[in-house]
Image (spheres, rainbow, N blue to C red):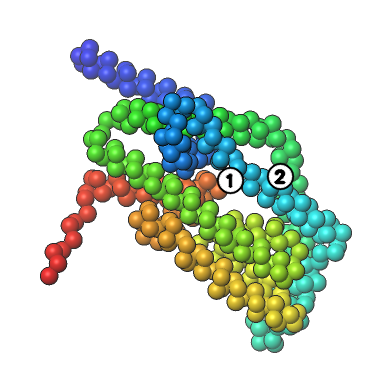
Amino acid sequence: MTSSALQNRTLLLLLAAVTVAFAAILWPFNGAVFWGVVLAILFAPLHRKLLRRMPRRRNLAAFVTLCVCLLIVILPMALIGVSLAQEASVAYERMRSGQLNYGAYLQQVLAALPAWLLALLDRFHLTSVAELQARLASVGAQASQFLATKALDVGQNTLQFIVSFGVMLYLLFFLLRDGVQLATRVRDAIPMDDQHKRQLARKFITVTRATVKGNIAVAAAQGALGGLIFWVLDIQGPVMWGVLMAFLSLLPAVGASLIWGPVAIYFLATGATWQAITLTAYGICVIGLVDNLLRPVLVGKDTKMPDYVVLISTLGGMALFGLTGFVIGPVIAALFMATWDLFAPPPAPPPAE
């Protein structure tokens, strides 16, 4: 082996080792780094507009962009989180005091069911109120233990959350200010054709923006509409249920219906017919159509991926990476398709007759 080849291999080995070590150092703050990068990509157009107005004041342009991000993204999320915590605390206290008895609600639903449906449910041992109450009590105990554990974790990890939040804001400022130069250096270091690198970078940025904006827009719309109808129907905790519908809307097609569907069934079983009809019609025609209309336009149109690929990659990403997977999954799917297009370009369309 020549001295030059040995030096190149040693350099590559050293490069891989220090890269893995650096990634391990950043891993405790992976969420902060990830969302710092995502927010920098989302707010880069605004930063460029500000920079054109103040070309010699890069720090001020980045700081103003950071303030806008805090105002329109982080502050509303914090206010919603406070309202959610208050309503969840009230609901939990009502459950502990017995004012909120799901067993009684279930008994009302079973009493209103037709005989043939009761017989069908009886085959699966689902009509015994005592048995179902025992199951609900078991589930409630497990849920209470889970919530208590999470509350203890939040209390213990408050300092870690504050540190991660500070790291995200600090990183976001410098990514806004120096992100273009950093991206250029990374792109230049990758041993690929320049055209291929530009195509992959463009795909990554486009899919990240479309996925975050599209999914957040759909979640916000469905959560707001669901909370509104719960408030109109005088259902306690509309903010809490709206936030739950917003989170579940990340599961396309059926997400929000997992909340309003059982409530509509309860209304129907207890004789509140107009509330049941109103909630069902609103859920199908308003909340449901938001997902069917907005998601393909905001996500599929910009990413240029089939709807089934967006759905599967979103579900798979959330299964592997948790909540952040709704961004990571489609991005990986888009890069997968773009890379294979570079390796094996799609056939040209047939000539028009």
Q: Secondary structure at mark 2?
A: helix
Residue at 39% in and 31% down: 180
Residue 300 horizontal/vertical position (percent): 40, 58
Q: Secondary structure at mark 1?
A: helix
> Can residue 255 be seen here?
yes
- Please state which of residues 33 and 206 is positioned toward the viewer in this rendering: 206
Is 129 rendered above or below residue 321? below
Answer few, some or many: residues within 10 Å of disc 1's Cα (few below 14, many 20 plus, some between 14 and 19).
Answer: few
Extreme residue in the front direction: 53
Q: Which mark is residue 72?
A: 1
Residue 67 horizontal/vertical position (percent): 58, 37
Is 33 rendered above or below residue 347? above
Q: Which mark is residue 207?
A: none
> Mark 1 belongs to which amino acid?
Ile
Residue 133 horizontal/vertical position (percent): 78, 67
Q: Quadrant of residue 190?
A: top left
Residue at 71% in and 62% down: 238
Q: Quadrant of residue 128?
A: bottom right
Residue at numbered disc 2: 150
Q: Nearer the viewer, mark 2 or mark 1?
A: 1
Tell me which label, 2 or 1, sits earlier in the chain: 1
- Of the 4 image quadrants, the one containing the C terminus is bottom left
- Of the 4 image quadrants, the one containing the N terminus is top left
Residue at 72% in and 48% down: 82
Answer few, some or many: residues within 10 Å of disc 2's Cα (few below 14, many 20 plus, some between 14 and 19).
Answer: few
> Mark 2 belongs to which amino acid?
Lys
